[in-house]
Image (cartoon, helix red, strand yellow):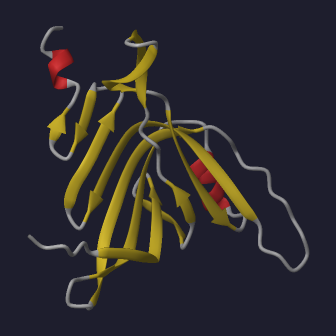
């Protein structure tokens, strides 16, 4: 049994596409947190358990540097398909560093058109938050998760946790 776990560290670069158009490079982004709805049961007092397959509202955010037409394109109040590509550094058991490709696909609707704070000598940092309808994450070509709220998909590492619920409907 190997006791080595690859060490993931620095993000080397990233790009953002909105509706198949390159709109930004080297942005800060926050992918959605997947939070399951919960229910309380009485077991030696109250215990809260996740309702696996039922997912709370998801939100993503990205911070784009500078004001331009691409900033407005990614934040128009309509449904968009975003693709985030990023490369993370991976240290293997032999100590060799390799680049590992990651992709996140998000379908969502921007919640804001960001305010732009202008200061002489500083770049503008504009945060766009997105209400997420679908979130799919790949690391090194392998799908790790796909959460699609409108199509009732809650697939994590290949297992669809909503399938048991859907079978009864």
Which quarter shows the N terminus? bottom left
Residue 61 sits above or below residue 49 on the image: below
Q: Is residue 74 left or right of residue 162?
A: right
User: In this view of the protein, which residue sits in the foreground, 121 or 52?
Assistant: 52
Q: Residue furthest right?
A: 120
User: In this view of the protein, which residue sits in the foreground, 90 or 19?
Assistant: 90
Q: Quadrant of residue 140?
A: bottom left
User: In this view of the protein, which residue sits in the foreground, 111 or 6?
Assistant: 6
Residue 127 sits above or below residue 9 on the image: above
| Residue at the (60%, 37%) spot, across then down | 77
Q: Is residue 59 left or right of residue 67?
A: left
Residue 6, percent from left and from top: 26, 75
Which quarter shows the C terminus? top left
| Residue at the (14%, 9%) spot, across then down | 168
Residue 22, percent from left and from top: 47, 65
Q: Residue furthest left?
A: 1
Q: Is residue 166 left or right of residue 109?
A: left
Number of numbered discs visible in the structure rendering: 0
Residue 9 sits above or below residue 156 on the image: below
| Residue at the (28%, 42%) spot, across then down | 146
Residue 91 sits above or below residue 113 on the image: below
| Residue at the (77%, 73%) spot, across then down | 123
Residue 61, percent from left and from top: 57, 50
């Amino acid at each position: 049994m190997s006791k080595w776990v690859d060490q993931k560290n620095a993000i080397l670069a990233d790009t953002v596409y909105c509706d198949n158009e390159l709109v930004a490079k080297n942005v800060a982004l926050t992918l959605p947190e997947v939070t399951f709805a919960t229910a309380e049961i009485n077991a030696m007092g109250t215990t809260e358990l996740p309702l696996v397959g039922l997912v709370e509202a998801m939100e993503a955010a990205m911070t784009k540097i500078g004001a331009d037409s691409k900033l407005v394109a990614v934040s128009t109040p309509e449904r968009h398909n975003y693709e985030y590509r990023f490369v993370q550094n991976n240290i293997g058991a032999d100590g060799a560093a390799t680049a590992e490709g990651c992709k996140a696909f998000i379908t969502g609707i921007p919640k804001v058109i960001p305010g732009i704070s202008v200061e002489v000598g500083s770049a503008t940092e504009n945060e766009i938050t997105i209400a997420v309808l679908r979130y799919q994450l790949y690391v090194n070509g392998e799908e790790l998760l796909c959460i699609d709220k409108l199509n009732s998909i809650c697939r994590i590492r290949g297992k669809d946790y909503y399938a048991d619920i859907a079978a009864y409907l």
